[in-house]
Image: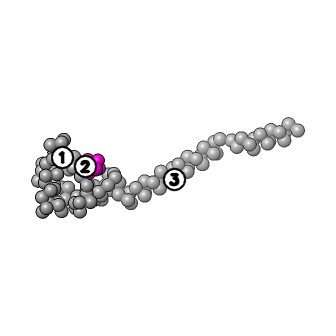
Amino acid sequence: MEREFKIITDFLKIEENRCASIEEVSTFTDVAVKRIADFIRDGRIYVEDFPNLGYGCAHCGTLIQRQMLCAGCFEEFTSEVNKTLKADKLLEGLNKPDEPAQAARYWKLRN
């Protein structure tokens, strides 16, 4: 792994290779695209220095340089999670009796 990292960094240090894509880096270094993407995600390769170096979004494949999801997929995922949480909270509220209201009814019936 460290040997592969050194091969990649040595390749990227050459000025004409600074605009290489992840596929080109993989082809010229014989290091798997997934391994290069892992180095980027781990912060070992700073993509800010390499404008075309990125990897595909885990959901849609759009070229990204950080995280696992592009901004669009992240927003969609967040929205779906929020909808699910709100629905679960609503169901929980419907299934759980309103305790203060029940107590008031108990005392009303008792009197």
Q: In this view, does 22 lie to the left or right of 88?
A: left
| Image position, residue 21 (x, y; %) | 19, 59
Q: How far apart, in angstroms, are the residues tagged by discs 1 and 3?
A: 42 Å
Report the mark closest to the observer, 1 or 3: 1
Q: Is residue 26 visible?
A: no
Mark 3 packing: few (<14 Cα in 10 Å), some, or many (20+)? few
Query: Are the two marked residues, 2 and 1, in contact with CB atoms closer than 8 angstroms?
Result: yes
* Residue hosting label 1: 5
Q: How far apart, in angstroms, are the residues tagged by discs 2 and 1?
A: 9 Å
Residue range (magenta) = 37-44
Vertical position of residue 68 compared to residue 104: above or below: below
The answer to which of marks 2 and 3 sits earlier in the sequence is: 2
Residue sitting at 80 percent across and 42 percent down?
A: 105
| Residue 25 covered by magenta stretch | no
Snapshot colouring: one colour
* Residue hosting label 2: 44
Q: Is the magenta stretch mostly helix, strand or loop?
A: helix
* Residue hosting label 3: 83
